[in-house]
Amino acid sequence: MLTGADAIEHAERFGGQLHKHADPTEGARENISVDEARDVVRGDPSLIYTDSPAPVIYYTDGDAYVGADALDALWWDLAQGDLVAAISPALRQQALDYLQQCKTDEAPMGVTPQSAIAMVEDTPTGEQEDHDA
């Protein structure tokens, strides 16, 4: 769960909903606007949160892929043996979970699960500053 300014940034970039915990002056509120959240954060950042899942993002060659497109683009680059620039922690986990359950004949685009797991584990995580997701 993201809180404070991180939650607001996440909602702006990926469309997550913002919520406010109860405080001594009012009860909890759901689905508040970004502007309302900013006002609350000025007083107490811990009151604002989002429970939206971490985005699944894959960065390669200056492009950013989000959601299902991220997994498809990652498989394509792995199958081609291309250098993978960076993946989000959520995509890394999703890819590893899938590959660990994969049988050799079900591997994406002919890449064996073992080799794909090694490539995913060797891929750096994080975000690049020069992208628009």
Image (cartoon, grey):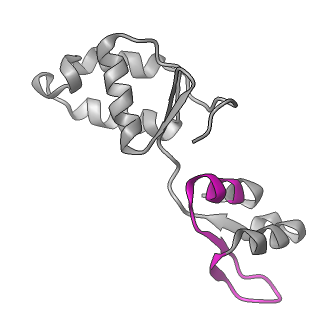
How many marks do you count on the picture?
0
Magenta run includes residue 31: yes
- Quadrant for residue 107, please give it: top left
Left or right side of 22 for 41: right
Q: Residue furthest bottom?
A: 26
User: In this view of the protein, can residue 117 be seen by the observer?
Assistant: no
> 33 left or right of 74?
right
Q: Quadrant of residue 124?
A: top right
Residue 62's x, y, as percent? 57, 24
Q: Nearer the viewer, residue 60 or 41?
A: 60
Q: Is residue 127 visible?
A: yes
- Asked whether 56 or 35 is in front, the reply is 35
86, 1: nearer the viewer: 86
- Residue at 14% across, 22% down: 104
Residue 47 image position (x, y, % from top left): 75, 71
Q: Which residue is rendered at x = 63% and y = 59% of the image?
A: 11
Tell me what residue is drawn at x 32 percent, y 13 percent: 80
**Extreme residue in the right direction:** 43
Q: Quadrant of the C terminus?
A: top right
43 left or right, relative to 26: right
Q: Quadrant of the N terminus?
A: bottom right
Q: Position of residue 86 (x, y in %)?
A: 54, 25
Q: Pick out the residue farthest to the left.
A: 105
Residue at x-position 28% and y-position 36%:
98
> Which stretch is magenta?
8-32
Residue 13 magenta-drawn? yes
- The image shows residue 2, relative to residue 72, as above or below, that is below
Q: In the depicted view, which residue is nearer to us: 16 or 29?
A: 16
Where does the image place residue 33, in percent across and percent down from the top left? 69, 74
**Drawn side of residue 97 relative to residue 57, left or right:** left
